[in-house]
Image (tube, helix red, strand yellow):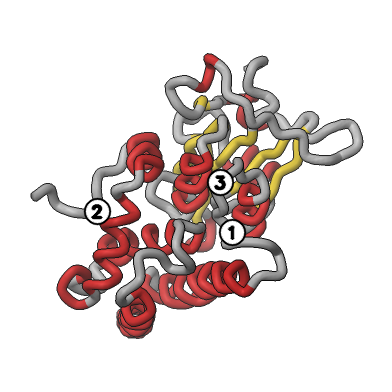
Amino acid sequence: MANSTNFITLYYVPSACSLVVHLALRHLDIPFNVVPLKFSPGEGGGWNLSAADGSFDHHTYRMLHPKSKVPGLRIPISATGEAAVNLISNDSYKNGPLKLTGSDASDLTNAAFLTEMPAILDFIGSLTPAGIDLLGGEAASLRRARVMEWTSWLIGHVQSINWTDMRSDLEEVRKRGLQASRVSYQRINDLLVDREFAVGDQVTVADFNLYCWYRTGQFYKVGDLEKEWPAFAAHAKRIEQLAAVRLALEDEGLTSAFAKE
């Protein structure tokens, strides 16, 4: 791992909400490592996360990420404690992200571990190469605030409330979650009518969030997405056509959200 220790490292579960960060990193086209994880049933009805290849268990991951969730981002730091991220690719990255395993994946020497989607997206957005702005503009701009508005609502409401209910063991609670999700999808559709992107005239992290929630809606069978919410579906199709999105899907072993025509 000698040539990749100063790259950031994404901890993710294929097709989970961590895909948002994966899409953003691929779009920025900066070198990064990945550590694929897998879910397993935990005590008390919860879930554990461990290395997908079995090289470390859920206890090890919990030492890295005490909340034991995804995404997680390991950031190399300098002697002063500041981020020291290498944004320059080398031969080790020419075929995409490097998959780390075992102690290479669980070592926090000279590194910090960042959690929570908004914080992670804000950090990697600050690494933006010239000409790419995934956060929507300067810190005090309304457009940037709109991007954060989308992100906060999708993570704080759609994910935390709607999908928690959808995964319940109680049928009544699942039905409530389904109805709440349908209301949310209608709102998303209404906001995307006649819009190429969620905010402004270029792709932002809000668009990657929306794309992932489109795929989640398919998985949970929220409804006939293309028929009921055509603006949402059209937006997801546009985002999926981006080269970075196709690369991230390939990285995670995922297929297109749309049937081949």
- Residue 55 picture location, percent across and down: 53, 27
How far apart are labels 1 and 3 at the CA level? 12 Å
Amino acid at dot 2: Ala
Q: Does 236 sit left or right of 94 as displayed?
A: left
- Front position in the image: 145 or 82: 145
Q: Which mark is residue 135?
A: 1
Amino acid at dot 1: Leu
Task: Identify the residue at image location x=44%, y=49%.
Answer: 19
Q: Does 92 sit left or right of 219 as displayed?
A: right
Q: Which mark is residue 131?
A: 3
Q: How many marks?
A: 3
Is 34 placed above or below 44 here? above
Task: Identify the residue at image location x=47%, y=43%.
Answer: 27
Q: Which mark is residue 210?
A: none
Is 207 placed above or below 85 here? below
Q: Secondary structure at mark 3?
A: loop
- Residue 248 picture location, percent across and down: 40, 40
- Front position in the image: 228 or 106: 228
Q: Secondary structure at mark 1?
A: loop
Q: Secondary structure at mark 2?
A: loop
